[in-house]
Image (cartoon, rainbow, N blue to C red):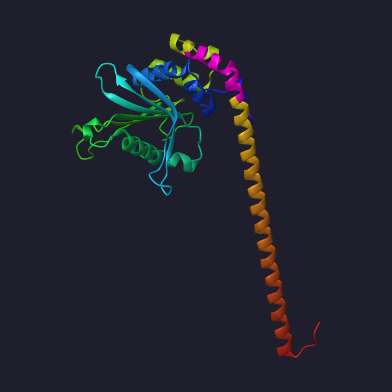
Amino acid sequence: MKRKLEDLNLLDDFLFGSMLTYPDTGEAFARILLRIILNREFENLKVIPQKVYYGSDTEYHGARLDVHAEGQELLTQKNASFDMEPETDSRKEAVAALPKRVRFYHAVIDTYSLESGKKYHAIRDVAVILITPFDPFGKNRMVYTIRNHCVEDTSIPYDDGALTLFLYTKGTEGNPPEELKQLLKYMEHTVPENAVNKELKEIQRMVDTVKENKEVRLRHMNFLEREERMMERVWEEAWEAGMAEERVNTERERKRAEQAEEQIRKLMEELKLPGI
């Protein structure tokens, strides 16, 4: 179903991406999200919307990250990379694949973050953050924090710099900060009445600016047209596949009828019955 630009929320890929590509909102929007989600301040933040990592060969899978950001943590001065994206595909097979998809994202980002000749300690910390309106693990938690650790003894320090966060907008278990609850509710239902604190009001101002921009509105119209053409193509391919299957079935039935007729003729000849 087509949705007007005015009706989109921040879990919609188009609006989320537009917020980060728009020159006056991109860095500020990413900075607010990271501060609330990670409870840390970052400086020298560089936002690269829809970062594309191509496979090393045409046979290998690449990755398109909705929002790739790089910066330094203010207190530790550690370099870090972030991938943030909303994920609304709640199909069973898509949800089951999320852990391996995230593993792939980490691997691809790491591959491109270490320059030739650099030592391994130069690899940036990486946080992959997926924001979902469905519960990816069925435990009703708002925050699922995933890190690598030693299974036999979890007290052993194992800081490989890899962090994954699954944020479920409607989760109630655990004790997430109030700011995060407010942010996730606002992202799922992006309306002024849900902008209940200073930073969300600032995001709402950015949302209004982006939605009113003529170029963004034109891109959204083009996006809807491409989406409609893709759906038409899918229906055409499905119809053609159905017709092809129908032709195969018709041919199969024809052959079966011919075989049955031949068997009847042979049986009649054996029994020396008159033909029909």
Q: Residue 198: where, in percent of width, then height?
A: 44, 8
Residue 126 vs residue 217: left or right?
Answer: left
In the visual, does 71 lie left or right of 26? left
Residue 131 visible in rendering: no
Q: Is residue 79 above or below residue 96?
A: above
Compared to 245, does 84 lie above or below?
Answer: above
Q: Residue at x 66, y 57 (%)?
A: 244
Q: Main secondary structure of the magenta part?
A: helix
Q: Residue at x 62, y 44 (%)?
A: 234
Work out whether residue 196 or residue 130 is closer to the camera in this orientation and state it.
Answer: 130
Using residue 42 as the reference point, say whether residue 225 is left or right of it.
right
Please check the rendered image and state whether residue 209 is part of the magenta-colored stretch, yes or no: yes
Residue 46 picture quarter: top left
Q: Quadrant of residue 171?
A: top left
Quadrant location of the C terminus?
A: bottom right
Magenta highlight range: 203-218
- Which quarter shows the N terminus? top right
Residue 144 x/y as whole percent: 37, 30
The residue positioned farthest toward the front in the image shown: 117
- Rendered residue at 33%/39% (across/down): 107
The answer to whether residue 67 shows anywhere in this view is yes
- Going 46% across and 13% down the picture, which residue do you hit? 200
Q: Is residue 77 magenta?
A: no
Residue 273 located left or right of residue 197 = right
> How many tags in the picture?
0
150 vs 21, nearest the viewer:
21
**Percent coordinates x, y for residue 228 in the rendering:** 64, 36
Percent coordinates x, y for residue 95 in the rendering: 45, 39
